[in-house]
Image: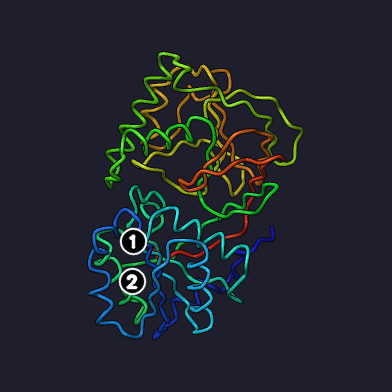
Amino acid sequence: MNGPFMQSPEATDHYYKNGQCLKVGVITNPRSGGNKRGGGGIHKLLEHWPEVMHHEAFDPQGISTALSDFSRNGVKLIVINGGDGTVQAVLTILGNKRIFAQPPLLSLLRSGTTSMLPRDVGVAGHPAIALQRILLWSQSTNQDLGIQSRSILWVQRDTDDLFGMFFGAGAICQGIRLFHCKDNPMGRRGQLMPMLTMARLLLAILFNNQDKITPFLNNTGLNGRQLEKRADLLVLVSTLDRLFLGMRPYWGTEEGPLRYTAVGTKPKKLLRILLSLFGSGNNRHAIPTNGYSSHNVVEVRLDMQGDFTLDGELYAAGEGPVTVSSAGQALFLCSC
């Protein structure tokens, strides 16, 4: 499977060589949830690490400039000090522009409002403390951090290509709009506010309130198969092991880098299914006849209208179908 994030089999071993010293670059989004009040000590910490390159950027142009500067100066480890949207912006630029000859090692700090991606494949703890651990690791590679490889989603639509780790449509997009407009207009950090939004949506589903939860009409094709007409409450495709609150809404058994899950418009046994998502995710009631479909796949094709989300950012589907596949694997330095 080819893609812009393909890593050689020797890449991980390369980073673990004794005495390996990696040049580090840090991208800080000053507008992310955790950085709005001064950056949480990041700037003060970096005063003691003058060899570390640091750029502040909040839009694609600024992030692209930072990445190009890192590449010219031999940066091998990029620390992303921002939210999920900042991570997605970095992945999209790396995927589209091929700025680095060899994809860099990435490390994610919990500096966003929700920080779903860093909670799964990032470094735990306060951003400044986490960054200190990363910088020490870059000098000796003997700290309590490890490298994980994860597939990156390649989202192709008629206007452009996007790269990320969590794709959603239907009620997920409605939940994001509700979260930002009503439940969390002040941008409070953590998982409590997303939990409140999920509870509101769950009640709407239980009481079949279509004013709050409208059916997501689409034609879906998995792994190149013929498109199937569907009406779902939500569709998600992810390469994350766990979503916010530690949920694992997958139970596919096939071989495939992408986890696809769809929930029909009138799901049965919803509460039982929901409780199982905080464990293994497996539940004997999570079957198509009850309105649940989950598979491990290599490609999802959605002929859809409206919008979708990629790592918390909303995008218009455009005129043609949206195709989600794997762009290969990126390497992440994260908590063991």
- Residue at x 44% of width, y 81% of height: 17
* Within-10-Å neighbours for mark 2: few <14, some 14–19, many 20+: many
Quarter holding the C terminus is: bottom left
Q: Secondary structure at mark 2?
A: helix
Q: Position of residue 59 (x, y in %)?
A: 47, 61
Q: Callout 1, which amino acid? A: Val
Left or right, 244 with reference to 12:
left
Identify the residue at image location x=43%, y=39%. 248
* In front of the other: 199 or 176: 176
Q: Which numbered disc, 1 or 2, marks the residue that appears first in the sequence?
A: 1
Q: Is residue 202 above or below residue 188?
A: above
Q: Is residue 336 visible?
A: no
Up the image or down, 240 lies above or below 334; here it is above
Q: Is residue 191 left or right of residue 89?
A: left
User: Label 2 belongs to which residue?
Assistant: 134
Please determine whether, in this image, residue 154 is positioned above or below residue 218. Answer: below
Q: Residue at x 68, y 50 (%)?
A: 159
Mark 1 crowd level (few <14, some 14–19, many ≥20, 10 Å Cα):
many
Residue 81 visible, this orientation: yes
Chosen colour scheme = rainbow
Identity, as a three-letter code, of the amino acid under mark 2: Ile
Residue at screen point 38% across, 21% down = 271
Label 1, on which residue?
Answer: 123
Q: Is residue 306 above or below residue 109?
A: above
Q: Position of residue 233 (x, y in %)?
A: 52, 25
Numbered badge on residue 320: none
Judged from this view, the residue extending furthest toward the right is 226
Q: Are marks 1 and 2 in contact (CB under 8 Å)?
A: yes
Task: Write down the quadrant of residue 32 in the picture.
Answer: bottom left
Q: CA distance from mark 1 to mark 2?
A: 8 Å
